[in-house]
Image (tube, rainbow, N blue to C red):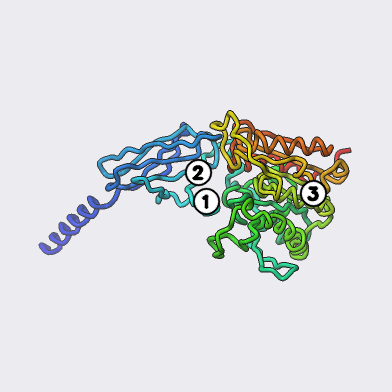
Amino acid sequence: MKSSLLAIIGLALIHGWVAAQAPPRIVSPEILADGRVTFRLLAPEATSVSVTGDWPGGIHATTTLMTKDDQGVWSATAGPLKPEFWIYSFRVNGVATLDPNNFNTRRNGLRVENTLLVPGAESADYMVNAVPHGAVSLQWYGSAKGGPERRAYVYAPAGYEKGNERYPVLYLNHGGSGDEDAWFSCGRITQILDNLIAQGKAKPMIVVMPNGNITRIAAPDYVKAPPALPANQDPGRFRLFPETIVNDLVPFIDRTYRTRSDRESRAIAGLSVGGAQTMYTAFNHLDLFAWVAAFSGGYPVMPGIAFDIPAPPNAAELKGPDLTRSIDPVKFAALLPQLNASANDRLRLLFISIGTADTLYPSTHQAVKRALKEKGVKYALVEYPGYIHEWPVWRVTMKDLLPKLFQPASK
């Protein structure tokens, strides 16, 4: 009896010691009822900790200093934040680090950052909701000219596996720092598609997301490759990837999936450098594509058309690439031989969009509009006030574009 009592007392003492030594339970991030968000990090030996996020949106990112309590937990509260898919990271003693208590991350090129989805009406289409879900396959496809295989993400809508219906296809290009994973992890494209299709706002479609870096066959965390040069340092590469879309990817998708393979059922779109690749592909191959969309087009990468300009007076209000570069609209049009008034009868939609706080907006974007006007090409234009060259505007753009694609011709 005495030994049993001593054992119980001993266990109690051990439990008390373990409890005293156990680290505090950390909840981070914690979304509060009023939309503010509290971030926490256990770092008792640190001397300075901060959290930086891409809020409140537009050109501004916000860094908030965190304070330490007597248990070594640093915390800070930001906001209130509007419903959005936010990006953030910590900085500990000057070194950037992820939030170890938040397993939600995104990879954007070589950058890995934590994500935070604040719920609400504006972000509802970025969430996994109780709707039928499509499936994403990672497909390898070969080259007609004997080059290496390349990888693409392919979204098939809900019900594809069990049916025999044929679907229209959207080819969707990423930007200069991205790869075939970009629209999936940064753009929330599968959630947007699932939700808009379920709401009846978008037609069910197949969406193909290739790797547009001609020197990389797949994402850098999957297949190692030499460092990719910026396209403007290797302009001879620019024409190569669009040709792989036409000669390799489109035939592969039509062979592999139940597609509607007429041009009226084929669209191509892209952001930034992918927007320039989209325009080049489409206006050299209007026999293949009837729906074309370019978001925040990074046209200075196109060969032989860029030139240096002074920084605009409102440079401090802008964020993005090529602030001091623009393009010659005549040379731009010369690279696109089918960019003329006859395209109006062939295109079902030419959609151009950009944020007004994008560095490409003051000059490059205006030059493209001049080229389209001079060539007599009709287009739909959306300019998003206050948005910069970053994913929030491209997600919004997709929600605007998808309902327009593959709709019946108006009478």
Residue 365, compared with residue 106, is above or below; it is: above
Residue, disc 1: 106
Image quadrant assignment for residue 401: top right
Residue, disc 3: 283
- Alpha-carbon neighbours of circle 1 within 10 Å: few (<14), some, or many (≥20)? some
Residue type (three-letter) at the residue carrying disc 1: Arg
Residue type (three-letter) at the residue carrying disc 3: Phe
Q: State left or right for residue 235 relative to residue 47.
A: right
* Quarter of the image with the C terminus in it: top right
Q: Nearer the viewer, residue 250 or 354?
A: 354
Residue 214 position in % (x across, y down): 65, 59
Residue 194 seen in render:
no
Under circle 1, the secondary element is strand
Residue type (three-letter) at the residue carrying disc 2: Ile
For the point 40% across and 51% down, the residue is 100
- Alpha-carbon neighbours of circle 2 within 10 Å: few (<14), some, or many (≥20)? many
For the point 67% across and 49% down, the residue is 274
Residue, disc 2: 87
Q: Closer to the N terminus: mark 3 or mark 2?
A: 2
**Circles 1, 2 touching at the beta carbon (< 8 Å):** yes
